[in-house]
Image (cartoon, rainbow, N blue to C red):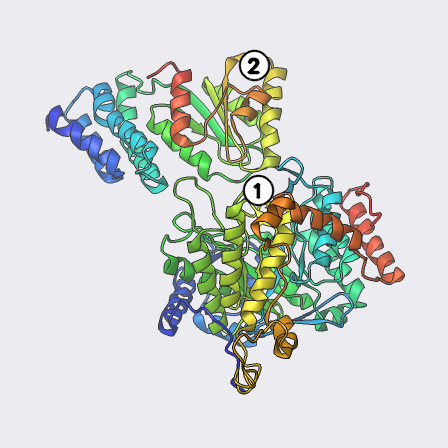
Amino acid sequence: MIETRKPKLELLSTEFIERIIDEGLTLLERHGVLVENTEAVSLLAGAGAVVDRASGLVRIGRKLVLDSLATTPSVITLYDRTGSRAYTVGGDEVHFDPGSAAVTLLDHATQEERKASTADLVAFYKLVETLEHLHFQSTGLIAYDVPAPVADCFRLYAGLCLSGKPFVTGTFRVEGFRPMKDLLAAVRGGENELRSKPLAIFDACPSPPLKWSHLTSQSLIDAARAGIPSELISMGMTGATSLTTIAGTLVQHVAENLSGLVICQLAGPGAPVIFGGSPSSFDMRKGTTPMGAIETMMIDAAYAQIGKHLKLPTHAYMALSDAKVNDPQAGFETALGAVLAALAGVNVVSGPGMLDFESSQSLEKLVIDDGICAMVYRLLDGIAQRDDPVALGAFEGFTPGMSFLTHPHTRRWYRTEHIPAGLVDRDPYEAWVAAGRTSIVDKAHLDVARRMVAYAAPPLAAEVRKDLDRIMAAYGRASGVDVLPSTEF
Amino acid sequence: MTKNEIYPKMNEAIVAGDREAARALAEDAVRSGLDLLEVVEQGYVPGIQKVGELWERGEYFLPELISSAEAMKAAMAVLDPALNRQNLGARIGGKVVIGTIEGDIHDIGKNLVASMLQAGGFEVFDLGADVKLERFIDKAEEVGAGMICLSALLTTTMMNQRRFIALLRDRGLRDKYKVLVGGAPANRKWAEEIGADGYAENAVAAVKLAKSFAGRP
């Protein structure tokens, strides 16, 4: 049998990749990066980086970066809540998770964005739990009724109670890390168990150009020490906070991410790190950061290629849209991004469900996007040689007028070769009219309701749940938050 | 250079966003003893007006718009002190206090509006980002501003625009200031709802609005 080719997109030549990496390293060596965290600065200085006390810039030599790369694992294995299902984050494996940390939810009934509540967050987790092509959860909504001091921890807490999938999450304040780690360790049954079977990825975003804030540096350090994967989210905006050229932005992307990677490795050698990002093509008319722009996707696909060249797991914010409702723009930007991300072999693709410049989530869109992801996985499976010979065997006894519909070969292969339509409309015109001219958004809305009923909480041991409750309540008290939203989930 | 030679050059420097040229020409004008009010009105202002037109026609984008505003600022940094020495304030537009509101650190849009207002002849007091509501009022009271501009990028921080109007009312100062609101989540309806005096969707529109409040063409 001829081996199936895995379809692949590579935008950059090897020569260009190496040039971009080289300039990124030179940028760190010559100009440095601003690190606003004393512990991170002393780690860097201790490893030979040159700290300019006046400007606060830390110049990192290329040897330190290369040494750090050498201790960074090229593959991370995440495990679900039970610890039995493993997900490889590395190579060309592709996993989708919902675009994260939206502040609003698109309300289907009013078609308006509104603030998201804890009830919405619960619905979001339940829905995502049922969507088979979204391998990971994300703490995707910021609920307004959760007091700010505990917001980061509470959304992970609720998620761990409701879902069995691995999580993509992150801290909003330095204090949030400890209880979030404790929640994860409680699920695993200990910190060492969590280290050997990571359950969550923590996002950490440098501030372009070339700055690691106190909060994000601390997240890198804390996660590295706990063996929790850090996802480096460099996010230059072309022509605003990074160079306007795509290649120029890539150089800065490399410098920002690699400086973060060095901090991780110094804090915990061998710490898992994901070469990710959320850069964008800056809109020179509106001053906005379109995630659905083709140039944004080109930057993403290119830095993923660079990440692979560096033998690192990769991540991108793709498969999302800047549309405000589930209109054609929402569909085509999401699908285009999903396809390009998958072909680029991005390991963690954060985006489904998301609208309006990463600020809004839609339950209906999550369902539609799950269907897009299904198509993408089919694409990635490629075209296989199922039979040998490819076709001639089935043509034995050929007669004109032979029907393939009843041919045993069809029954043998059609379910393997073709995926179901899902919510996509494939009705003949008359049938579509007779069925009420229903749009995919309306069908998605019904599907959300159906899935809410079908959702079954994955079993969680009562003592683990008690531990989670205890950790959350204690953190609430320590943060001066007396009343948390109802935890009847 | 005579004014017939220098005015078109000033105009060009602004349209091209050439900070150096705009500044050098202003210095020339001061040295040559030209009528500086006329220099502003006939040399530089037509340039920034042209830039506004090019923006509205979709020919200019943010890089050009900001560069031109910066060039205008560079020229005015030379002309303002000279005008003040002659007791001729060129800032006939009046004083404006501007900032990104409490809880919000996004200031790209606000900076742009501040630059364009300045280029449009207003004296601008930019308080930066994450500005406490009281500070807007204190500054406006201190400098004798006529207008307060509030920017917000987030739907959450936008609520502070409403709180600001209430605060002005509480302090009995509501009628003393024109309050303009802007930022991605704001719109005209929002401005009306919270009782602001106006809303502008971009920097060029903001200058037009501010000029209309100041009774200028």
Q: Residue furthest front?
A: A400
Secondary structure under badge 1? Answer: loop
Q: Residue furthest right?
A: A462
* Residue A216 place in picture, x, y as percent: 59, 55
Chain for disc number 2: B
In the rendered image, the quadrant that contains the N terminus of chain A is bottom right
Question: Any mark on residue A325, and which?
Answer: 1
* Residue A249 place in picture, x, y as percent: 41, 57
Relative to B203, is A227 on the left or the right? right
Relative to B94, is A356 on the left or the right? right
Secondary structure under badge 2? Answer: loop
Q: Relative to A97, does residue A383 appear above or below in the rendering?
A: below
Q: Nearer the viewer, residue B14 or A142?
A: A142
* Residue A352 place in picture, x, y as percent: 60, 54
Chain for disc number 1: A
Q: Residues within 10 Å of mark 2 (few under 14, many from 20)?
A: few
Q: Amino acid at mark 2?
A: Leu
* Residue A203 place in picture, x, y as percent: 60, 58
Q: Relative to A391, does residue A483 appear above or below in the rendering?
A: above
Question: Any mark on residue B95, and which?
Answer: none
Can residue A76 be seen from the camera position used here? no
Q: Nearer the viewer, residue A7 or B8?
A: A7
Whole-number angstrom distance, CA of label 1 to CA of label 2: 40 Å
Residue at image location 31% in from the left, 33% down from the top: B57
Q: Which residue is mark 2?
A: B173
